[in-house]
């Protein structure tokens, strides 16, 4: 019984240490497989105005962008194999000014649509958030909403 307090402290310490060492995973980057690095890099920098950041490979097959919230997006060119792309599988970016963003899309000649696929239309979710969908040069779906 003399060792009971020591045993309790040991169990308590191990319990705290196990919770500290098992942290919740967090997202650090997205990787997007592309056919033409320059075409895709131009798209993401002009449409979303993402800042290109230093990339360590220096092989001409990667471009990295700061997409906010300490997250980066890596565009990776590789020998192209057609992929099946479904609108349900998309990434989403929020913008502070949906009208300004749509004006930029129109200026760039980038088509957009609502969730059902109506060209040039804006979808409004039940919670009032506006959303549109565009496709990047490789056909990947991207949702843009104003939940900024």
Image: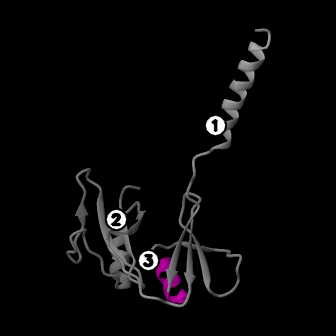
- Going 60% across and 79% down the picture, which residue do you hit? 63
- Left or right, 68 with reference to 137: right
Residue 93 percent location from the top left of the image = 42, 64
- Left or right, 122 with reference to 57: left
Q: Foreground mark, 1 or 3?
A: 1
- Going 22% across and 78% down the picture, which residue do you hit? 119
For mark 2, give the secondary structure.
helix
Label 3 – label 2 distance at C-alpha:
13 Å
Label 1 – label 2 distance at C-alpha:
41 Å
Residue 47: assigned label:
3
Residue 38: assigned label:
none
- Please name the residue that numbered disc 2 is placed on: 98
* Quarter-of-image position of residue 28: bottom right
Between 40 and 107, the one nearer to me in the picture: 40
Q: Residues within 10 Å of mark 1 (few under 14, many from 20)?
A: few
- Please name the residue that numbered disc 1 is placed on: 19
Label 1 – label 3 distance at C-alpha:
42 Å
Q: In the displayed structure, would residue 24 be above or below residue 91?
A: above
Magenta highlight: main SS: helix
- Going 71% across and 19% down the picture, which residue do you hit? 8
**Magenta span contains residue 43:** yes
């Amino acid at each position: 019984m003399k060792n009971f307090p020591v045993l309790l402290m040991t169990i308590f310490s191990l319990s705290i240490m196990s919770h500290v060492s098992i942290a919740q995973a967090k997202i650090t980057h997205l990787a997007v497989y592309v056919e033409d690095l320059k075409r895709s890099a131009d798209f993401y920098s002009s449409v979303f105005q993402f800042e290109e950041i230093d990339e360590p490979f220096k092989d001409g097959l990667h471009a990295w962008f700061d997409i906010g919230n300490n997250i980066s997006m890596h565009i990776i060119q590789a020998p192209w194999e057609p992929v099946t792309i479904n609108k349900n599988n998309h990434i989403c970016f929020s913008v502070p000014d949906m009208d300004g963003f749509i004006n930029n899309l129109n200026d760039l000649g980038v088509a957009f649509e609502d969730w059902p696929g109506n060209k040039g239309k804006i979808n409004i979710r039940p919670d009032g958030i506006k959303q549109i969908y565009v496709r990047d040069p490789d056909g990947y779906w991207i949702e843009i909403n104003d939940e900024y």
